[in-house]
Image (spheres, rainbow, N blue to C red):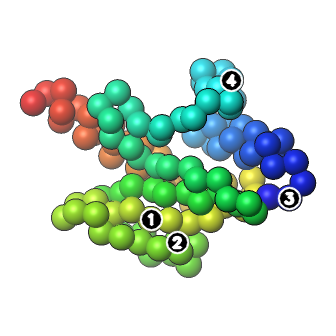
Amino acid sequence: MRGDEKGEAQVFLERLFRALGHEGVFEAGATLEERVTGRDRSGTAFAGLHPRKAAVLMTIRTDAPIKSARIRKSEQASRNRYHHDLLVASPEEVDAELVAWLKAAHRLAAASTLRIIKA
């Protein structure tokens, strides 16, 4: 990101929220001035955003490896959990592939939450 990083971050997040099916950041009930933990009520994270000077480092939690040149680091956290890091330097990089990974990670976290609640 170049220039006004806060302004560009807001554009990035707006596009990300729309790609995930929300009308926008504020319509989804998000605030941009507070720290967002990325966790649901059970404490299960599906993704993390880590601002860097020129990009956002995104960590996505999945149940399988992701084979892509976009992934800069993958780590098997447990038998069925993987953490994948990638850099997102512009809103245009929030494309169908990335949105699909995020949706799958969100479904995985939601399924984990249901198992916790049912137990």
Disc nearer the start of the sequence (1/2): 2
Question: From this viewpoint, which residue is outermost toward the right?
Answer: 3
- In this rendering, would 85 be left or right of 107? right
State the residue in front, 39 or 113.
Answer: 39
Helix, strand or loop at label 2? It is loop
Disc nearer the start of the sequence (4/3): 3
Q: Is residue 44 visible?
A: yes
Q: Which residue lies under the disc numbered 2?
A: 71
Task: Kindly identify the residue that appears in the image at 56 percent across and 50 percent down.
Answer: 49
Does residue 114 lie above or below 80 as drawn? above
Q: Which residue lies under the disc numbered 4?
A: 26
Disc nearer the start of the sequence (3/2): 3
Marks 3 and 1 close (CB-CB < 8 Å): no
Residue type for callout 1? His
Task: Kindly identify the residue that appears in the image at 76 percent across and 39 percent down.
Answer: 10
Residue 84, labelled with which disc? 1
Can you give x and y, in whole percent of width and height, for residue 5 in the image? 81, 49
Helix, strand or loop at label 3? It is loop
Q: Quadrant of the C terminus?
A: top left
Residue type for callout 2? Ile
Callout 1 crowding tier (Cα within 10 Å): few <14, some 14–19, many ≥20: many
Can you give x and y, in whole percent of width and height, for residue 91 in the image? 75, 53
Q: Is residue 23 visible?
A: no
Can you give x and y, in whole percent of width and height, for residue 84 in the image? 44, 65
Marks 1 and 2 close (CB-CB < 8 Å): yes
Task: Kindly identify the residue that appears in the image at 33 percent across and 40 percent down.
Answer: 44
Q: Nearer the viewer, mark 3 or mark 2?
A: 3
